[in-house]
Amino acid sequence: MKTLLLVCGIFLAGTVFSEASSIEDRNDENAQRLYTRIYSRLGGRGEYADIYDYIPDLFGSGFNDNIESVLQTGMWMYYENNNYNVEYSGRVYFVHGIDLRVDFPSSFRNAASSIRYAGDRHNPNGNTWTLFDGEYFCGQSFFGATDAYSLQYLDMKASSLVITGSSPWTIYSGQGYTGDNLCVYPTDHDTGSAGDYLDFGIYPTMSAIGIPDNTIRSVRQGCWSKKIAQPPKIEYEERRENGGWGYAHLPESLLRKSSGSQQ
Ligand SMILES: [Ca+2]
Ligand SMILES: [Ca+2]
């Protein structure tokens, strides 16, 4: 079993920004990888930096509260606060796609303070699952590309889920693939200009999956259950062939303020 531990705060932002030149490889055959190029202005203008990894805190990078647009491949989540909104809940903006350029809405410009992706950064459409402690992909995460007999520090804590690749997965209420079970399938499919594609299953809450919160204890590849989760309704701001984006989470108090100001 190969389950990688991804804990908030173990990656340093400084190591990532030095990698900027390697983004040139992304159009080479077999070189597709997850990346996001963040810009300080709309339309891919202003300062930019290339990111390939989790960034728990943009402070000191020059881009904290200073991102207005992105160009990216894969599913990336942009959090209003550092450490993926662990200490302070806040807005979460998600973008998934292939070489997709997105202008953030006015209500999320110059707001992001931490960033991370879902899946395997070296294998964009690999079959993976990422569980999150918080709803809307907030908090600690636990990633796997194979079966997980137990979920270790995320045991009975998962509150949201993203899968990548075309494979379904079975989630269980007991360790070792026991207890109540349910299949989750990819829900979204993006196609790039070269005919390449990415699959995602986006489940922002456990009620979206149809199970009680904080009950998942093991994960197994393939569909081993008679029950299948309904695809949740994702509120996209815009959906195109090569991607989609929108708020994963916009607190009630900000809903009224932002409506009408988004473009
Ligand atoms: Ca912020
Ligand atoms: Ca939880």
Image: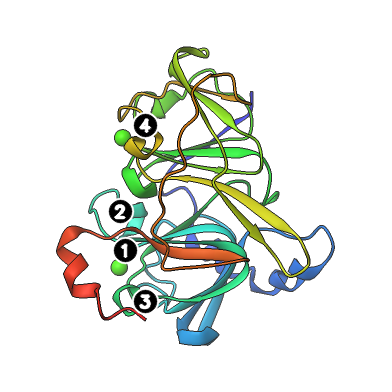
Residue at the disc numbered 2: 85
Residue 100 image-quadrant placement: bottom right
Amino acid at dot 2: Asn
Pick whichever of labels 1 and 4 is earlier in the sequence: 1
Amino acid at dot 3: Pro
Whether label 1 lies within 8 Å of ligand 1 gets the answer yes
Residue at the disc numbered 4: 210
Relative to 133, say whether 155 is above or below.
above
* Front one among 114 and 119: 119
How far apart in space, not on screen, are marks 1 and 3 (Cα)? 13 Å
Query: The residue tagged with tag 1: helix, strand or loop?
Result: loop
The reply to whether the C-beta atoms of the residues labelled 4 and 2 are less than 8 Å apart is: no
Relative to 123, say whether 133 is above or below.
above
Q: Residue at x 57, y 30 (%)?
A: 169
Amino acid at dot 1: Glu
Query: The residue tagged with tag 4: helix, strand or loop?
Result: loop
Residue at the disc numbered 1: 80
Pick whichever of labels 2 and 1 is earlier in the sequence: 1
Pick whichever of labels 1 and 3 is earlier in the sequence: 1
Residue 238 position in % (x across, y down): 46, 69
Residue 174 position in % (x across, y down): 43, 14
Q: Is residue 169 left or right of residue 68?
A: right
Residue 226 position in % (x across, y down): 53, 19
Q: Residue furthest bottom?
A: 46
Residue 105 image label = 3
